[in-house]
Image (cartoon, grey):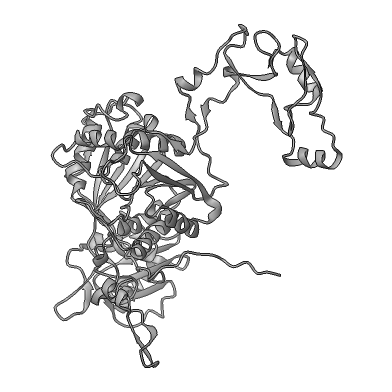
Amino acid sequence: MIKKQKLELTWVGKENKPRLEPRILLEDTEMSYHAASRVSDDDIFDNRLIFGDNLLALKALEQEFSGKVKCVFIDPPYNTGSAFEHYDDGVEHSLWLSLMRDRLELIRRLLSEDGSLWITIDDNEAHYLKILCDEVFGRANFVANIVWQKKFAPQANVIGVSDSHDHILVIAKSKTDWRPRLLPRTDEADARYSNPDNDPRGPWMSDNFTISLTGGARGAQFARTGISPNIYEIETPSGRRLMPTQGRCWGTSKERFHEMVRENRIWFGRDGGNVPRVKRFLSEVQSGVVARTWWPREEVGDNQESKREAAQFNADNVFATPKPERLIKRILQIATWPGDIVFDSFAGSGTTGAVAHKMGRRWIMVELGEHCHTHIMPRLKKVIDGQDLGGITAAVGWQGGGGFRYFKLAPSLLEKDRFGRDVISNSYNAEMLAEALCKLEGFTYSPSDSVYWQQGASTDRDFIYVTTQTLGQEQLAHLSDDVGPDRSLLVLCSAFRGTSAAFPNLTVKKIPNHVRSRCEWGHDDYSLNVENLPKAPPKFVAMEDDGGAASVGLSKRQADLFGSEGGK
């Protein structure tokens, strides 16, 4: 018996994963923005714009939003080797894979069971990324590779072949649970229907009445017996006698065919002598059309259209690689319903949030670059104020309304003091400390207004209390009495005297000692740049020298690539 071997993508440094700190998010109400008044009852104000590293932001959102995001759209740096103004887009291949893997794993946790991930990418990494997604999501959950026509004219000065498309990889969290929506019918699609025989059921189009003879159970039966109930002679109204062509059979049995003739569902042409075709009535077809994997620029826009849109918000510094609003609109039409949460961790110029806002979806966007303030915020403010007249505004009847909340990632919880010891950061006040430790310990931060020690809970009987005080035996005894025998309390404090063993309903730990080894503290930037990677021990490989003796060390290629930092 041959044992199946699991195939997976390998690369240098794959085994090294960052130990992310679950940061808290701090709202800056001066930067948050909302409309001056309600435009409709459906206005959404709790959208989130997060300024900070997207990997840390994903980790920060994990506790609150796991299993709640319906659609994730990301347009990551393509790793083409080109230098982009707003971010470096030339990370060495293996590093790019590691950085994408870390983000995909967190994205998967955020997605609802019926949610989906959509990634735009070009040929440089598309096929590796597909395999990487197979590893993270499972190959069975791959949905499609959509080809988007991003350019109309060929690039005259290109060496080689001018690229005209990007890929959009579509992956479901669980393909068995994911149900894509139909796209609205277009005037072009409806124009294929007419009513040449004045049928009272209205416009219709004719469809092939033959099907394959060799497929499925029908084919198996015919191969075994040489007989099929769908092979018979048809006489047209004009008197022609017809048999299906070789390898084909009629679409129904003879009995059902005659029923369809009586119901005027078979079309033999105006003169009654053509090969029979089925009449498909517009009134009976599904209300929308199934999406295809080819998206031409006429339907969803191209790079030129997207740059014109982006120029409306910052004409002096147009974002290099925006996506057209019509492209995001189509994705959200297929993947979401109004009110669903849409997430984009590579916000760029803010197209995803702008389109989601106009379509009545809730949105979360993350961006580390300064264009969060120079591009995204001016764009969103115009959308909210009803002053954005471009993109999909007219198509969806957008008139403004709603708003967003602006967040920054909190600084790292621990910092080094002047003696090199780990201490709680001076930037943390009591509320921030309690919230941060709740998140770190897996508790929901929900401070009670009446019970000082109930700052968070994991269940209705398990609570957490955070204090920078030194607790004595008497204070612990009071806490234990308040908690009672049917509840439990995790106490995190700077120090305590005596022993907590006498209080079975209390678990007492010192901070920061209790959390020192939990994560990578003080690492603020995991963006797609080599210098921002978590440090890892250098990998030594055995090599033979000229004399045949074994020696160890980094290869020249590794040394050039990693430098003195080690790296992945």
Q: Is residue 449 above or below residue 375?
A: below
- Residue 307 in the image: state x and y as whole percent: 24, 37
In the rendered image of this protein, does residue 498 appear above or below residue 34? below
> Between 57 and 490, which is closer to the camera in this rendering?
57
Choose between 51 and 121: the one closer to the eye.
Answer: 121
Q: Which residue is painted at 82% across and 30% down in the image?
A: 229
User: Measured from the top left, where is residue 4 in percent x and y?
Assistant: 63, 66
- Across and down, in percent, residue 75 comes to 34, 48
Task: Count how many numbered circles sit on residues in the image.
Answer: 0
Evaluate whether residue 29 shows in this view: no
- Of 429 and 499, which appears nearest the observer? 429
- Can you say whether 384 is above or below 519 in the image? above
Q: Quadrant of residue 375?
A: top left
Left or right of 340: which side holds 261?
A: right
The residue at the point 71 percent across, 70 percent down is 1
Q: Nearer the viewer, residue 338 or 46?
A: 338
Check the image and report above or below for 426 versus 498.
above
Q: Is residue 131 visible?
A: yes
Residue at the limit of the structure toward the right, as seen here = 225
Quadrant where the C terminus is found in the figure: bottom left
Q: Quadrant of residue 149?
A: top left
Residue 294: image x %, image y %? Answer: 46, 37
Q: Residue at x 46, y 21 (%)?
A: 188
